[in-house]
Image: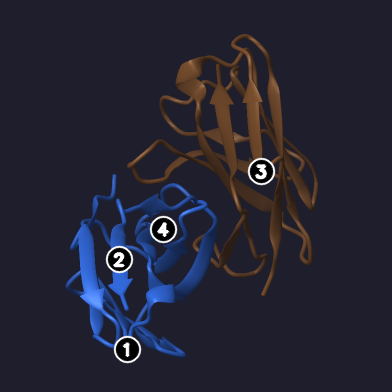
Chain colours: A blue, B brown
Amino acid sequence: KNEVEQSPQNLTAQEGEFITINCSYSVGISALHWLQQHPGGGIVSLFMLSSGKKKHGRLIATINIQEKHSSLHITASHPRDSAVYICAVGGYSGGGADGLTFGKGTHLIIQP
Amino acid sequence: GAVVSQHPSRVICKSGTSVKIECRSLDFQATTMFWYRQFPKQSLMLMATSNEGSKATYEQGVEKDKFLINHASLTLSTLTVTSAHPEDSSFYICSARVPGTGTSGTQYFGPGTRLTVL
C-alpha cells in the first residue's frame, strides 16, 4: 500500500507570498494528482503529472519520480487560494488498485 | 473541463433507511467511476471501483452488501447505502475517469454528497 505524506499540514501566509506544499509517497507510481478542496467539500483537479513540471496560471506542480516527491507552488498567493490541497497517487508500479490514494491534505489560509 | 455531477448534495435520513447517491459524467462516457468516502478531518478513502457493465471492485474493509454500486450506463453510477447507521455519516465523492487516459488517467470529481444518518 502506498503511503502518501504531505507537508505542511497547515499553512497560513500573507497575500502575495510564494507558497510551497510538498508530497512524498512510498511506492512507485505512474501518475500523481494535485487536488483542491473548498470548504463545501467539492474537489477540483488541478494537475495530473507523471514527470517533470506543469504550470497553470499561478500554479506550478513538479514531480521527481526517482525521489518519489512532488511539490505544488502558488505564486502571488491570494485569499481565494485558501483551500485544502490534496496530493493523490495512483497507478502503482507492478499493478494495483485503479483508484487513488490520498494524502491528508494541506490546509492553506491566505490572509489579506 | 469535464463535469461530474452528484445527486443529492446533502441528505439526512433515519437509521435503518437506504439512501441512493447518483454520480453522472455530463460530457464524456466513463467506463470507470470511483466512489470515495471522507470522514471529518481525514483524507479521502477509496471505497470501490465501478466498471460499466460489470461488478464493482470493493476495497478491503468495505462491505459490498451494504454499499451497493450499480454502473448501468456509461454516464451513471449509483451508490446505495443500505440500512444506514450513524457511523455511515460521511462525505461521499465520486469521480469519473476519462477514457483512454490509462489506469491512472485523468479523473474528474463530483461535488460530493454529505450523508447524515440520525
Residue type (three-letter) at the residue carrying disc 3: Ser
Residue for badge 2 = A108
x and y percent of residue A75 in the render?
A: 32, 88
Nearest to N terminus: mark 1 or mark 2: 1
Residue type (three-letter) at the residue carrying disc 4: Gly
x and y percent of residue B46 in the render?
A: 46, 42
Query: In the drawing, what numbered circle is on residue A85?
Result: none
Q: Quadrant of the N terminus of chain A?
A: top left
Residue for badge 1 = A75
Residue type (three-letter) at the residue carrying disc 2: Leu
Q: Quadrant of the C terminus of chain A?
A: bottom left
The structure residue drawn at horizontal position 65% and vertical position 51%, both measured from the top left corner, is: B32
Residue for badge 3 = B9
x and y percent of residue B107 in the render?
A: 57, 62
* Alpha-carbon span between mark 3 and mark 2: 25 Å
Residue positioned most to the right: B73
* Alpha-carbon span between mark 4 and mark 3: 27 Å
Query: In the drawing, what numbered circle is on residue A90?
Result: 4
The structure residue drawn at horizontal position 44% and vertical position 65%, both measured from the top left corner, is: A36
SS of the residue at dot 3? loop
Q: Decide: few, some or many residues near mark 4? Use Cα within 10 Å; few <14, some 14-19, many ≥20.
A: many
- Please give the chain letter of the residue carrying mark 1: A
